Image: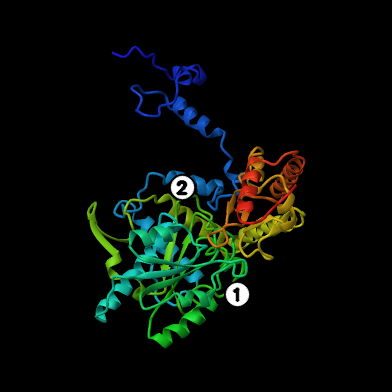
Amino acid sequence: MSQTKHSTATTAVYGSDEMVRPAPTMTIPDEMTTPEIAYRMVKDETYVQTQPRLNLATFVTTYMDEYATKLMNEAIAMNFIDQTEYPRVAVMAARCINIIANLWHTPEKGDSKSGATAVGSSEACMLAGVSHWLRWRKRRAKEGKDNTRPNIVISTGMQVVWEKFAQLWQVELRQVPLTREKRTLCAKDAVAMCDENTICVVAIAGVTWTGLNDDVEALDKELEAFNKSKGYDIPIHVDAASGGFILPFVSPDVRWDFRVKGVASISTSGHKFGLVYPGLGWVVWRDKSMLPEEMSFSVNYLGAEVTQVGLNFSRPAAQILGQYYNFIRLGKEGYTKVQSNSMAIARYCHERIGAMKCFENYSKDVVNPLFVWSLSEEWQKTAKWTLYDLQASLQQSGWMVPAYSLPKSIEDIVVMRIVVRQGMSRDMADMLIGDIERSVAELDALKYPTPSREAYEKSAKQLGKVYTH
């Protein structure tokens, strides 16, 4: 028998035996403990992390109002696939798909739009990619042609999910390089990479690396002419993980969605600017002809026949309730106000940071509530620090503002990024700008270069550049 002293409901949390023993890392503990002690052990371990609302690196929603939070907490035990037990959740999911499809100007008639729920934008991208892969294979087989060498065309500004998709489904990934002159997908360059084996071309609304948007209309124009000349039927998928819930509200006249004839599918993230806690994604097809039948799986589950489009069955239902709540609570007016405020704060930060002599904004305009900047050319030559040092300095004040290299072909450009989400106020922006200014002043006062600066100079020297202090 174990001689371990048991903590009871009357034991003070920090007077318990558990608080003087290391937390379990390899095996499950032998004994039970109280919920208060277990809660405090987990809570204390996360305490030193950046507070979610100060994490300007993430796109993921970190704030929802108390009623949304209450609603989702009450649904935390619901499994979306259990449609026999929770039939109204499936109804609400279908309503969300209809609302999103109409937000993106779907041409599909009827009261049941072609779409699917996903755990996040990554699964939504996967589903869209698979649909185009299956359609291409079926078409090639019908024509009696080889269907073993598919490819997909996308810019190097892609999310990593597209690399995963290409690897898992054995699709050649053809990447259009971004350059200093071509900072979004070049339509002509993309079409030049297409051939009879191209399953689709992916345009991005809200590039993760920079916040910019690919020109979907320009791509459609080039691709339509190419398809017509070759007799192909290459469609466009729009990865709108970051822009799908921004553009309809802040730039409604920009044509990037189903108003563009060649757009066959669009994916987005409900847990980004859809304003829902993670994880939730959505994908919508132009119509049912774009969604292969073999993607719909039916299973007799808990006494009912359940048909579902997705890579897995079990998934949280709470986020779907949160999305539907937002649609009811905010409406078009509320989404427009929230997203417009985020845009206003992003533009304010963009202006303030761009005015600092040591920085240079990557783009003149802010088209989504995020932007990136680099060290100015002059500062780059003589600074004793890099943006990685600024990131570390800001972390000491609780901010997470990431520094990173841009995609291959422009990986020599190091930038920092701010993502403005619901929950960030003008006062918070001023605090951030103040902390950036103080950090820069401290870094400029250094007598010797930092290790990251020394590494940068070594790399620059190898490239034939010489920088001195």
| Rendering quarter of residue 300 | bottom left
The structure residue drawn at horizontal position 62% and vertical position 66%, both measured from the top left corner, is: 180
Q: Position of residue 111 (x, y in %)?
A: 40, 72
Q: Earlier in the sequence, mark 2 or mark 1?
A: 2
The residue labelled by disc 1 is 253
Q: Secondary structure at mark 2?
A: helix
Q: Is residue 258 above or below residue 177?
A: below
Looking at the picture, how far across and down is residue 118, in whole percent?
40, 57
Q: Mark 1 falls on what kind of element?
A: loop
Q: Amino acid at mark 1?
A: Asp
Judge whether residue 93 can be spotted in this image.
no
Residue toward you, 81 or 172: 172
Q: Where does the image place residue 261, in percent across and percent down from the top left?
A: 47, 80
Farthest-out residue, bottom: 229
Question: Closest to the observer: 339 or 405?
Answer: 405
Tag 2 residue: 72
Q: What residue appears at the point 66 percent right and 42 percent down from the top-left corner? A: 394
Left or right: where does residue 411 sit relative to residue 364? left
Between marks 2 and 1 in the image, the one whose residue lies nearer the viewer: 1
Mark 1 neighbour density, 10 Å: few (under 14) some (14–19) many (20 or more)? few
Q: Are marks 2 and 1 in contact (CB under 8 Å)?
A: no
Q: Is residue 49 above or below residue 4?
A: below
Locate residue 161, reporting x and y percent: 43, 58
Q: Is residue 319 left or right of residue 380?
A: left
Identified by mark 2, the residue type is Met
